[in-house]
Amino acid sequence: MTTALVTGATSGIGLGFAERLASDGYDLVLVARDPQRLELTATQLATAGVNVEVIAADLGDRERIREVEDRLRDERRPIEMLVNNAGFSANQRFIGGDVGAEQAQIDVMVSAVMRLSHAALPEMVERGRGAVVNVSSIASFLPFSTYSAAKAWVTSFSQSLATELEGTGVRALAVCPGFVRTEFHERAGIDIDRSNDTWWRDVDAVVQRAMEDLRRGRVISVEGRGYRAIAVGTHLLPRDALRRAERLRRSRIAGRRG
Ligand SMILES: NC(=O)c1ccc[n+]([C@@H]2O[C@H](COP(=O)([O-])OP(=O)(O)OC[C@H]3O[C@@H](n4cnc5c(N)ncnc54)[C@H](OP(=O)(O)O)[C@@H]3O)[C@@H](O)[C@H]2O)c1
């Protein structure tokens, strides 16, 4: 049996990956903070006939990450796929905002992704197979906030890994979703117009696209034609035009708040 470790596996995109991997026959290691929700998710996923372990850990806590790193390095129970998915948005202005919340974004979405990839990859390369899937964001292409800067790191890091991994049999993929129906926006207190369905994607579509792109050996996965156009467009537009778009976005938000 092959095993996948998924962070942030109790909700949204992480849960979608866990469900898909369980139905593909992967045993699972689930990581998130809430232990009760982890147990509940493990029980549900085990009905697919796979083995499910849980690790309750805050990935913003360096000590707790060590337990996950040790599990990834365990040669007797190899991990074939690492899905670095856990993440959140502090949804605040940087200036005058809570610096702890800014730091937590970097800890969970940058440091933890780097450390877990560093722990997992040597074994995968040694075995000549495996994959690291990093859930980034379409925001990684846009200069919006500490969140988008952290995701820019995730996308760039995944691309760099993919290059370093060439010829090893191991793959790296950055998944760059747009708006996805999960708990993300509610948790962040993001007031967002959900009425325009065109831009909202389902978790299953994002996961399906990511798994196909991984199989094809692609390095960036973007689900939805509109989002693919943004991904291409942001590479063609000058950075100044992107900053003007960000100014417009901020003034719209300010207008809505009133
Ligand atoms: N939804 C979107 O529109 C969207 C768009 C682009 C990118 N993304 C990215 O997709 C990823 C998943 O987000 P989602 O939309 O699926 O959000 P979600 O529904 O809120 O799920 C987040 C998951 O991460 C876990 N988590 C959060 N903080 C954690 C921490 N410090 N340590 C360990 N686990 C933690 C949560 O469980 P606990 O609370 O129990 O820890 C939960 O399982 C994130 O990286 C996000 O940035 C989302």
Image: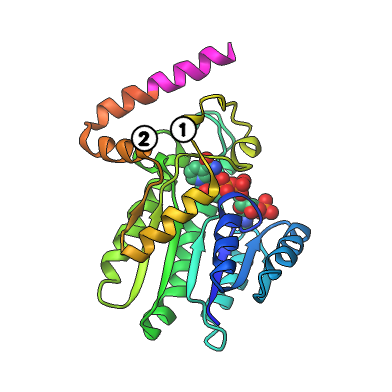
Residue 140 found in image quarter: top left
For residue 20, above or below residue 4: above
Q: How is the image coloured?
A: rainbow
Type of amino acid under label 2: Gly
Q: Secondary structure at mark 2?
A: helix
Q: Secondary structure at mark 1?
A: helix
Residue 199's disc is 1
* Residue receiving disc 2: 226
Type of amino acid under label 1: Trp
Q: Is mark 2 within 8 Å of ligand 1?
A: no
* Residue 46 x, y percent position in the rendering: 70, 70
* Residue 209 x, y percent position in the rendering: 42, 53
Observer-nearest of 148 and 178 = 178
Residue 42 found in image quarter: bottom right
Residue found at the very far right of the displayed protein = 36
Q: Which residues are magenta?
A: 247-258
Query: CB of mark 2 within 8 Å of CB of mark 1?
Result: yes
Does the rendering let one see residue 93? yes
Observer-nearest of 98 and 141 = 141
Quadrant in which the C terminus appears:
top right
Residue 96 found in image quarter: top right
